[in-house]
Image (tube, grey):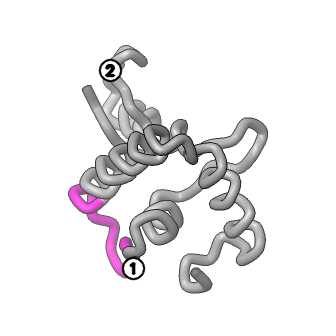
Amino acid sequence: IFVGHGLISDFLTVNIFVPPSQIIDTTDIFHLERRRLISLRFLVNYLLGKDMQQDVHDSIEDSIAARLLYMKALELKEQGIFDKVLHEIYDCGQRIDWKVGEL
């Protein structure tokens, strides 16, 4: 199983096919239909209270963050508040024009 954020583009870059049943993509988990995709950095900042990717892209940091976001999604679903929190993320993002420094 692959857990990540925006994995499809990563798989295309390295020219491999991974069956959808083996992909857990936080881009898809934290997405409302017909709405923009939310960046990994924004989600991590909003849900985990951490800033990341400030200077350099770090694929290890990304993979750890995606796993933590997946765990957070499971926690929110277990509590029955995932949909509410997802709408709050979109509301906040729109209000601050998706700028992480404004959180």
In terms of depth relative to the viewer, which is nearer, 57 or 48? 48
Query: Would you say 84 lies left or right of 61 here?
Result: right
The residue sitting at 25% across, 26% down in the picture is: 1
**Circle 2 sits on which residue?**
22
**Circle 1 sits on which residue?**
54
Q: Is residue 26 visible?
A: no
CA separation, marks 2 and 1? 30 Å
In terms of depth relative to the viewer, which is nearer, 56 or 92? 92
How far across and down, in percent of the image, does residue 80 sit? 54, 41
Q: Is residue 62 visible?
A: yes
How far across and down, in percent of the image, does residue 21 sit? 38, 16
Query: Would you say 26 lies left or right of 83 here?
Result: left
Range drawn in magenta: 52-61
Amino acid type at mark 2: Gln
How far across and down, in percent of the image, does residue 33 sit? 73, 36
How far across and down, in percent of the image, does residue 87 sit? 69, 53
